Amino acid sequence: MLALRLARGSRPLVLLRRLLVAVASAGAGFLLLCTLGSAMGHPDGSLVRLLWCLIPVAATTQFAVAVARTDPGTRPRHGLSAIGYGPARLAAVAATSTAVSCAVGSAVALLVFLRLRGGLSGRAPDGAAELLAADRPLPLGAALTLLAVVPALASGAAALALRPRRRAAAPEAVAPPGEPERPDAFAEAPAPTGLPWGVALTAAGLAVETYASRGGGGSPVPLPGGFGGSQAGVLAGWSLTALGLALAGPGLTHLSGRLLQAVRPGTIRLLAGRILMTEARGIGRPLGVLCAVIAGIFAATALYGSGGARPYGLLTGLGATLVIGCTAATLLTATLESRQARADTMATLAHLGAPAGTLRTAAAVRATALLAVFIPLTWAVSALAAIPLSA
């Protein structure tokens, strides 16, 4: 009930983000149902097609968690704590709100799927009967099970991400009554530890992909929506590469902030670098995931884009659009969360007389530094991944 009241009293931007979560959940649920329909008509390779849908499902889950983290209705407040809604209960409220948004999207996906199969109108549209196995009875239990995957994963991940973390504090570090503890937005944060692992996984993934592509005649992995056979080793190698980029993203962001402060930094570079180091864990991972997605698009274009022998199918296009959209929206949401986290510090700087132009210039310097690091990295990874595929 509290989740519904918070949703009803939310601002339009918050409602828009929840609507986007529902749209993403509808897209992922529709892909799962289409995979079920394809498995009914062509049982061979159904498990692989279902595993292929895990990529859009993971992107949707990541976006739902990012939206839950920025929801102002689930932030701890003294008034709510007094009536029993502390951080743990608010995490449960956030998980419930996420589950409701995803469940609405799953319901819409089911209605669209039934409409295309002719279950609501009595006749399936042209071209949809074979793809969705409209001539066969739909196993309702399997369909509902698949539709419950996205709400369950998203709500569980949101509850896990927003769970209260206990921090051991020294007795002298406890804030006096009436002065709640506030994190210093410009305190030097420790460097993320995932950069070496990310580099190692990226290199290992490229090596596996190169080795598998030279083997030739490997076991084909059929992808739904128009892609031909692809070697299992190539897909496994690319999965390792994407995981490595996601792990390396926070470390690269932290390193960018440290480099900005090198060699006698001025006020702008010092401010921009310290903010990047502080926000490395928040925006670094979505940046790494976006880098992996864009590199994968370039590699797939180099492999399948030349000539018209293997065109992109409808379901493949839908899955790619869902992954790209959710990844970009996750990055924007994480940026908004970081901006909200340092709002008090920025207001203090403005109150102390810091020019507004200085703050805007620091933001531009941060964006330029990130582009200077991640654009060449994306190009290099996509080029290295496309070389063995196009050979």
Image (tube, rainbow, N blue to C red):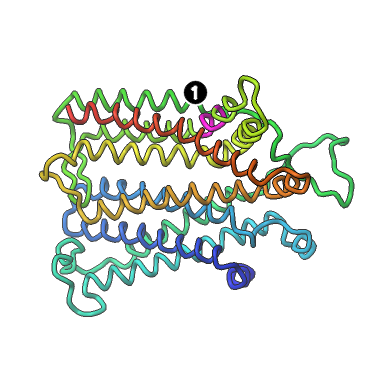
Quadrant of the image occupied by residue 6: bottom right
Please state the total of marks drawn on the protein image: 1
Magenta span dominant secondary structure = helix
**Any magenta on residue 96?**
no
Residue stretch in magenta: 250-255
On screen, residue 165 above or below 322: above
Q: State left or right for residue 376 relative to residue 46.
A: right
Where's residue 223, x and y in %? 22, 46
Residue found at x 81% / y 49%: 180
257 relative position to 82: left or right: left
Left or right for 281, reference 136: right
Q: In this view, does 211 lie above or below 151?
A: above
| Label 1, residues with CA under 10 Å away: few <14, some 14-19, many ≥20 | some
Where's residue 194, x and y in %? Answer: 52, 29
Q: Nearer the viewer, residue 370 or 238?
A: 370
Residue 235: where, in percent of width, then height?
28, 35
Give, as a three-letter code, the residue at label 1. Answer: Pro
What is the quadrant of residue 144 in the picture? bottom left
Residue at image position (15%, 27%) is 216
Image quarter (top left, top right, bottom left or bottom right) of the C terminus? top left
Identify the residue at horizontal 62%, vertical 26% (top origin).
Answer: 261
Which quadrant, please, contains the N terminus?
bottom right
Q: Where 383 sits versus 58, above or below?
A: above
Q: Which residue lies furthest to the top in this view?
A: 263
Where is residue 120? Give x, y as percent.
26, 78
SS at badge 1 = helix
Q: Which residue lies furthest to the bottom in this view?
A: 121
Whether 253 is among the magenta residues is yes
Taking 322 as reference, is 65 left or right?
right
* Residue sitting nearer the eye, 345 or 181: 345
Residue that numbered label 1 is attached to: 196
Q: Is residue 365 above or below residue 203?
A: below
